[in-house]
Amino acid sequence: MKKLLSLVFITGIALGTQAQDKKFQIGLVMGTTVNWTKIQTTKIEKNGLGNDFTIGIGGNYMFNENVGLASGVQFDMGSFELNYGADGSTALGDVFYGYSDTDIKQYKDGAVQDFTDTTAFQLMSRNYRTKYITVPFFLKFQTSMIGKFKYYGKFGLRTSFLGAVRMDDTGRDATYNPTTMTFTTNTPLVSRTMTDMKPEGLKKELSPVKMGIGVYGGAEWNFTGNTFLYAELGFNYGILPQLYPQSGNLADRKDNGDGTYSYSNLDIKNNPQHLIEFKVGLLF
């Protein structure tokens, strides 16, 4: 987290060295988002709306009085929840993973990798707690000053790079048999939540980059000197998958219909995230 905040600070210094040029504005920004995953599979379900808190640095470079570029660096901290299993559901299946302490083991080729223990978990729902570095890059179209205000619209890309993720998993204790490479849910069925879980391996369940096409509208108020207070609202349509299409840690159990089961890595296809963002900030 310290490295991410340092990146925001250094970027602000770099942009600030050019802020003396009248074409440049630089300042602080903070805001919030409401997000939801666009589900395109029957393997998972979204569970309500997620949210983010964002803080960082924003700036403008104007080609002329009315057209320019808006960018910056933001640090996003958020959460969202997905359902992976449900009793009596033919759509949501039985999803398992092997784990040690808070580490979720890798799953590949029908087996938990390098795992001789038996501790496993049947996943029912998962709350993702995320940290992203976001770089918005927008074309900005603004009016000339109307009194002490100017109004603008922005169109472009909002790109976020995954910094860290932790999961709070709700489900049931299970047992993994490393010899037969099968999972069994423990009885009696008791639901519990495991906190601060993290996947091993390069795949962290979430894609390293998520991107959305954004449209924003806002207003700037010149309340003193060269200082502007602004507020804006925008919608971002996700175009890259938020989650890996194929999990590197979750095992999907399929009933073969003859009393036996087969297992494979959970395949959830492309599920981008859409969001609505509200921000306020200062420009100097």
Image: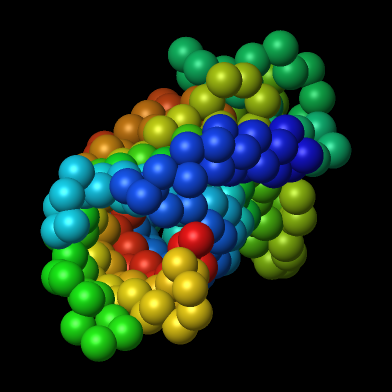
Which residue is at 25% across, 48% downward? 62
Which residue is farthest bottom? 147
Would you identify the image quadrant in which residue 165 lies? top right
Q: Is residue 152 above or below residue 157?
A: below
Where is residue 266? Give x, y as percent: 41, 35
Q: Nearer the viewer, residue 247 or 1?
A: 1
- Using the rendered view, name the quadrant where residue 101 is placed: top right
- Horizontally, residue 93 falls left or right of residue 79, namely left
Q: Return the x and y of residue 136 as percentages of the image width and height.
A: 36, 46
* Number of disc labels: 0
Asked which colour scheme the image uses, the reply is rainbow
Question: Can you say whether 148 is above or below 3 in the image?
Answer: below
Judge by depth and name the residue closer to the eye, 196 or 3. 3
Residue placed furthest toward the right: 101
Seen in the image, is 267 located left or right of residue 67?
right
Instruction: Answer above or below: position of 183 versus 277.
Output: above
Q: Quadrant of residue 151?
A: bottom left
Q: Is residue 232 visible?
A: yes
Q: The N terminus is located in which quarter?
A: top right
Residue 81 picture location, percent across and down:
50, 63
Camera-side residue of 60 and 36? 60
Would you place residue 46 above or below residue 135 in this image? below
Residue in view at x 67 percent, y 25 percent: 200
Q: Residue at x 41, y 43 (%)?
A: 21
Residue 202 image offset from top left, x and y in percent: 57, 20
Residue at 75 percent across and 55 percent down: it is 194
43, 215: nearer the viewer: 215
Q: Is there any visible trace of residue 97 in the rendered image?
A: no
